[in-house]
Amino acid sequence: MIEKRDKGAFYLEGSKEIGVLLTHGFTGSPAEVRPLGEFLNQQGYTVYAPLLAGHGTCVEDMEQTNWQDWWKSVELGYEKLKVEGCREIIACGLSMGGILSLKVAINYPLKAVISMCAPIYLSDRRAYFMSVLKYFRRFHKKSERYNGAPSREISGYLATPLACVPSLIELIKQVKPLLGHIEVPALIMQAEQDLTVRPASGSYIYEHIGSYRKQYITYEKSGHIITIDKEREKVFKDIHDFIKRLDQ
């Protein structure tokens, strides 16, 4: 029997010096970032991974949401870490969670921001026509490969609600021109075997973000969900090393 990881939000208490706001991706769930969250908690950090609105239940629920709903979930996550007593917060996100984390850096005080495979350019060019195509088809079955990822850790939807794609694109359009306003230290991570986001997205973010201290790392063997892929251990180490250097 294949183990099913919990798709819900999770909170892992550690030191209150730094709290990590860990955000999953479009149609995903906190399960895809849980291995990273557990690793960071083992290093002593408090970690909270919110469940974005419309996620973790059924794809029809997500169909009724938009980027403002997903953003509200992240804002509530930020507030939770503050209420729990975390003195400083690092926003870290995967895929759409990366774009949402960059938006946190634009709108709220942070110690640092980490984006993993955040979209600026989507690989499937049909995504830019979904405002029309959504009237002819409600859902699109995914074809993303998960190189080396245990199936028990893939807990997102198996289909994409087409009605939500234009809202994702609108979110990207909201964040993209404001990257220069981000001044906190930034770590940009991009998988080279990404089938969902064009790898040029990572270099674009790195080149346009306003952070004085910034780092760009690519992963040649990994697909889009780098937190559960072949190079996950390197991803975790690179994030930990980045955080450790923040006070140097």
Image: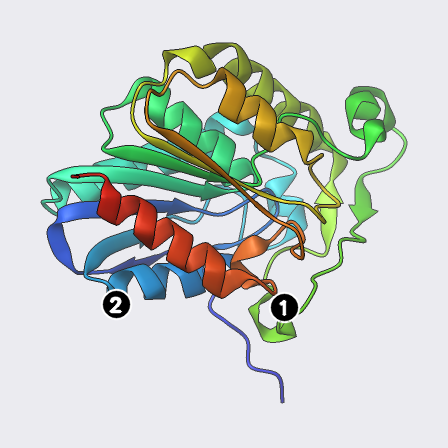
Q: Nearer the viewer, residue 17 or 5?
A: 17
In this view, the residue farthest toward the right is 136
Percent of width and height locating residue 139? 79, 43
Q: Which mark is residue 149?
A: 1
Q: Residue at x 66, y 51 (%)?
A: 220
| Label placed on residue 226 | none
Label 1 crowd bin: few (<14), some (14–19), many (20+), radius 10 Å: some
| 233 relative to 214 in the view: left or right | right
Q: Residue furthest bottom?
A: 1
Residue holding disc 2: 42
Residue 118 in sight from this viewpoint: yes
In front here: 246 or 84? 246
Say which of 46 and 133 sits in front. Answer: 46
| Residue at the spot 60% in from the left edge and 53% down from the top edge | 225
Q: Nearer the viewer, residue 26 or 217?
A: 217
Can residue 7 be spotted in the picture?
A: no
Is the Cβ of the residue at disc 1 closer than 8 Å to that at disc 2? no
Q: Please identify the quadrant where the N terminus is shown.
A: bottom right
SS assignment at label 1 = loop
Q: In x, y percent, where is residue 227? A: 52, 57
204 displayed left or right of 208: right
- Tell me the kind of residue under disc 1: Ala
Q: CA distance from mark 1 to mark 2?
A: 21 Å
